[in-house]
């Protein structure tokens, strides 16, 4: 099992439409939202490129918005991971 862990930008939430679109993908096993982190559980990954789009909605205006992180790792071997950052388009 593979987990994509998306830390949300301060003041943002994931839209319900975004969650629905992710849940309809066959590769997605489960989605959890805890505090400001979205966990996307995948059955497995292979050589094919995958794109996941999360639509975020600003809930609170935050000044000096800092980038947030995205981690992807194997549930059974968490040391095998990749890390990236993203920023708001509007910042």
Image (cartoon, rainbow, N blue to C red):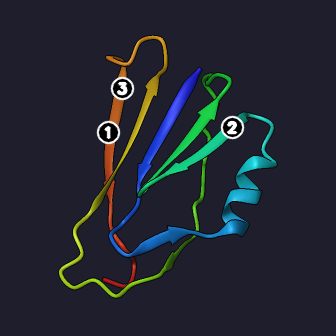
* Quadrant of res 86: bottom left
Task: Please identify, in this view, whether the residue under mark 1 or under mark 2 is nearer the observer.
Answer: 2
Depth-wise, is mark 2 or mark 3 nearer the camera? 2
Q: Is residue 34 above or below residue 16?
A: above
Q: Is residue 9 above or below residue 51?
A: below
Q: Which residue is mark 2?
A: 30
Residue occupying image coordinates x 28% and y 83%: 62
Q: Position of residue 70 (x, y in %)?
A: 38, 47
Q: CA distance from mark 1 to mark 2?
A: 21 Å
Place residue 80 in its image quadrant. Answer: top left
Single out the residue that lies furthest toward the top.
76
What is the crowding at mark 3: few (fewer than 14 residues within 10 Å), some, or many (at least 20)?
some
Task: Find residue 17 and report its horizontal and vertical position in percent.
Answer: 73, 68
- Quote the CA–CA distance across marks 2 and 3: 19 Å
Quadrant of the rendering where the C terminus is positioned: bottom left
Quick check: marks 3 and 1 in contact, CB under 8 Å? yes
Sequence-wise first label, 2 or 3:
2
Choose between 82 and 34: the one closer to the eye: 34
> Which mark is drawn over residue 81?
3
Residue extending farthest front:
35
Q: Residues within 10 Å of mark 1 (few under 14, many from 20)?
A: few
Element carrying mark 2: strand
Q: Where is mark 1, residue-wise? A: 83
């Amino acid at each position: 099992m593979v987990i994509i862990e998306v830390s949300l930008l301060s003041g943002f939430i994931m839209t319900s439409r975004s969650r629905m679109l992710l849940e309809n993908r066959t590769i997605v096993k489960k989605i959890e939202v805890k505090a400001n982190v979205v966990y996307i559980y995948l059955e497995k990954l292979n050589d094919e490129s995958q794109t996941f789009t999360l639509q975020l909605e600003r809930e609170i205006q935050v000044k000096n918005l800092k980038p947030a992180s995205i981690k992807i790792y194997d549930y059974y071997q968490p040391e095998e991971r990749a890390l990236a950052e993203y920023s708001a388009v509007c910042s």
